[in-house]
């Protein structure tokens, strides 16, 4: 038995799966922002599982990212090389918004009074220029203990190539201040660029005490309930890590929650034969979108969260404030806006009846007729359309529109924002949307996917099984993953192939050791190699996969050609300039057995047995309503077809098809919708 739990901003999603039968059970409980662990345990109980029967528990959490967003992490001190105290403050001396004269750089996570120096220095090859001053380090450790700083980052210049001085500093801290939490930069990233390395280590140290407390508490409560299985967390870069590893390096969990949807998308791409997918994950608070290209998740090795760089692998996810709880408001110019502020789980949308007075996307969808007030969450939760009307009326009176017109405007603005986010990760990166299918999931994904696909020119929408809980569903498909990297700046043509092979072997040995500590046998360990390359004189790099096994000099030409093609895909051109290697990377994968997903029984094709009525849906274009046929998704069978306008309902998700759209049920229960455009054909 497996269980996965995804803690979102509004709901906590739970999925249980019996590997023998492939049967899934989907549940939702309300998120408890003040104590998310209680929501997790409530999810276990609602799923009616025996804690002792579960082999794997996979967890996605937003605890780390929320600590960054709200600036509620631990007090952190930085220890760095003498003369480099202000590297973290200066950064790259750039501005996120160059032409905004009101721009103010976000407040630093570490004030200057908590940034310290120690005499030591290495050159770029790792040779000692100035020996580590142990006496000075001891005095500093004693000072930190007096101040009671709970978390310390050690980031010395060029420690990525030679970590000896960082290890000596750690030894001093353990002797003089044993209770302090210590983060060494080289353990998180063995790459150059001291600012990015420092920032990564600071974020790790900032959230480490919070994550340790949470995971210790949750793990203890699970143990009290009789749970004896493996406790895994999804990683920002895909895959999962053990709770023990997450407590040591929590920076890898910053985007833990959204990662589940991307992992599930990659698995579904293989399962259904749709290798190119763009995801649309619309939750209660935000919307996440990413890409699966040729069956592979798009992973970046440098990302920015709240203007803070992180140099660890992270799924390339674009997040915007456009969820079901996003609040509609009128700006100073009198125009209607939606988000990014959200009503969250408490009080939530006005229709929840928990004290919310602001109109949200969910309220608008209810007024339009997309949602059934009597069947929200399968009837487990009551929502009140009168409360939605009252909230939207506050806006419609100011806009001189009807309540229905205002509701349609709220949904249309949300769809436009989502379309813009998808363009950013696809069109602006050299991909054409027509080559992809749009995978819509999350609580609100099915409400907007067809119109978003129509707007951007995507021909097919896929609504996966368990769409409302799909991020938690995706967590069922994880492997345990570790990422390792080493800066290695050399010209490609003249590079020593044996030296490259040695470095790759060292990185794989590190991965083998980490997976072995997690209980993986050598036969269950796989290794994926990458290299980041660039043309000489460039700053940016392009990542390509490197074949397994020892490289030979004859392989260099093929690597160069592969880099050139990747550069052209990403930037629109390639040149004859010399190519250089910048970073070597290895992903170590501990393969877990994948659960069997049951196929759906074949139907007769007409879906008549699944129809349960109809209801009027407001159309802004005609200022009138149109009857939409309503179907029960659980009664649809493989091969059944439904023509729009139609609504497909399930307890945790609603899918809306418009006129001309045609849905076909796939063999695993996925809904494949051919999108109709205004020119009389497919999008």
Image (cartoon, grey):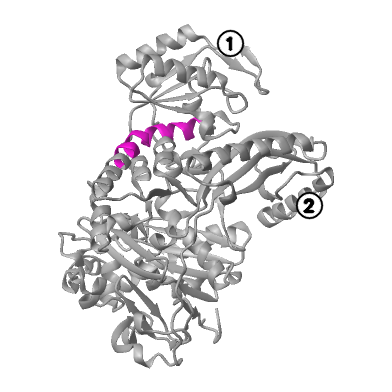
Q: Mark on residue 186?
A: none
- Quarter assignment of residue 647: bottom left
The residue pinned by badge 2 equals: 561
**Residue 6 in view in this figure:** yes
The image shows residue 8 at horizontal and vertical percentages of: 32, 55
Q: What stretch is highlighted in magenta?
A: 198-214
Image point 40% across, 60% down: which residue?
471
Residue 479 belongs to magenta span: no
- Quarter assignment of residue 683: bottom right
Q: Is residue 11 left or right of residue 474?
A: left
What is the spatial separation of the Cα atoms under label 2 and label 1, in whole angstroms?
Answer: 44 Å
Residue 213 belongs to magenta span: yes
The residue pinned by badge 1 equals: 131
Q: How many marks?
A: 2
Instruction: Pick whichever of labels 2 and 1 is earlier in the sequence.
Output: 1
The image shows residue 532 at horizontal and vertical percentages of: 67, 43
Under circle 1, the secondary element is: loop
Image point 37% across, 69% down: which residue?
24
- Quarter assignment of residue 490: top right
The image shows residue 430 at horizontal and vertical percentages of: 63, 59
The image shows residue 26 at horizontal and vertical percentages of: 32, 67
Q: Is residue 538 left or right of residue 659?
A: right
Foreground tag (2 vs 1): 1
Tell me the quadrant of the picture where the N terminus can be found: bottom left
Q: Does 39 appear above or below 507?
A: below
Q: Nearer the viewer, residue 649 or 221?
A: 221
Under circle 2, the secondary element is: helix
């Amino acid at each position: 038995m497996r269980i996965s739990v995804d803690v979102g901003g509004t709901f906590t999603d739970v999925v249980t799966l019996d590997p023998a039968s492939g049967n899934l059970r989907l549940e939702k409980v309300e998120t408890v922002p003040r104590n998310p662990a209680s929501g997790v345990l409530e999810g276990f109980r609602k799923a009616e599982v025996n804690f002792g029967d579960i082999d794997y528990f996979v967890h996605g959490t937003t605890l780390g990212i929320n600590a960054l967003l709200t600036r509620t992490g631990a007090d952190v001190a930085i220890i760095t090389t003498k003369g480099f105290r202000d590297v973290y403050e200066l950064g790259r001396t750039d501005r996120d918004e160059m032409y905004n004269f009101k721009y103010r750089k976000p407040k630093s996570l570490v004030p200057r009074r908590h940034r310290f120096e120690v005499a030591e220095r290495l050159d770029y090859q790792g040779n000692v220029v100035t020996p580590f001053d142990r006496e000075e380090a001891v005095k500093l450790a004693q000072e930190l203990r007096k101040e009671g700083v709970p978390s310390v980052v050690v980031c010395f210049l060029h420690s990525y190539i030679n970590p000896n001085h960082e290890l000596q500093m750690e030894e001093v801290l353990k002797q003089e201040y044993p209770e302090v939490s210590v983060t060494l930069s080289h353990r998180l990233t063995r790459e150059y660029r001291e600012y990015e390395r420092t920032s990564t280590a600071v974020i790790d140290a900032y959230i480490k005490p919070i994550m340790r407390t949470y995971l210790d508490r949750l793990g203890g409560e699970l143990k009290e309930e009789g749970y004896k299985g493996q406790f895994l967390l999804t990683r920002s870069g895909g895959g999962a890590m053990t709770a023990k590893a997450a407590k040591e390096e929590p920076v890898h969990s910053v985007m833990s929650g959204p990662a589940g949807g991307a992992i599930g998308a990659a698995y579904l791409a293989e399962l259904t034969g749709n290798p190119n997918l763009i995801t649309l994950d619309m939750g209660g608070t935000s919307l996440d979108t990413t890409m699966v290209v040729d069956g592979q998740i798009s992973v970046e090795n440098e990302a920015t969260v709240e203007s803070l760089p992180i140099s660890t692998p992270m799924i390339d996810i674009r997040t915007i404030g456009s969820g079901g709880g996003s609040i509609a408001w009128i700006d100073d110019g009198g125009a209607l806006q939606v988000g990014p502020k959200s009503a969250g789980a408490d009080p939530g949308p006005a229709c929840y009846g928990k004290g919310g007075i602001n109109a949200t996307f969910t309220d608008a969808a209810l007024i339009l007729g997309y949602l059934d007030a009597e069947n929200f969450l399968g009837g487990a939760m009551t929502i009140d359309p009168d409360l939605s009307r009252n909230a939207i009326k506050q806006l419609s009176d100011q806009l001189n529109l009807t309540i229905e017109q205002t509701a349609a405007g709220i949904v249309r603005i949300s769809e436009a924002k989502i379309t813009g986010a998808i363009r950013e990760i696809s069109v602006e990166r050299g991909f054409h949307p027509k080559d992809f299918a749009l995978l819509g999931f999350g609580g609100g994904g099915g409400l907007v996917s067809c119109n978003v696909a129509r707007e951007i020119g995507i021909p097919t929408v896929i609504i996966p099984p368990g769409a409302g809980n799909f991020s938690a569903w995706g967590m069922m498909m994880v492997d345990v993953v570790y990422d390792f990297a080493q800066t290695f700046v050399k010209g490609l043509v003249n590079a020593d192939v044996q030296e490259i092979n040695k470095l790759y072997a060292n990185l794989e040995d590190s991965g083998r050791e980490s997976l072995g500590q997690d209980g993986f046998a050598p036969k269950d360990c796989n290794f994926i190699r990458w290299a980041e390359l660039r043309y000489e004189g460039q700053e940016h790099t392009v990542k390509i996969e490197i074949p397994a096994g020892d490289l030979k000099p004859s392989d260099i030409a093929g690597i160069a050609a592969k880099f050139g093609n990747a550069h052209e895909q990403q930037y629109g051109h390639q040149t004859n300039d010399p190519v250089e290697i910048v970073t070597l990377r290895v992903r170590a994968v501990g393969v877990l057995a994948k659960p069997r997903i049951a196929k759906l029984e074949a139907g007769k094709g007409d879906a008549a047995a699944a129809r349960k009525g109809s209801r009027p849906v407001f159309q802004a274009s005609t200022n009138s309503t149109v009857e939409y046929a309503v179907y029960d998704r659980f009664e649809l069978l493989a091969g059944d077809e439904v023509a729009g306008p139609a609504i497909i309902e399930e307890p945790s998700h609603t899918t809306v098809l418009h006129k001309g759209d045609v849905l076909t049920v796939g063999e695993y229960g996925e809904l494949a919708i051919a999108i109709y455009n205004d020119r009389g054909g497919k999008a």
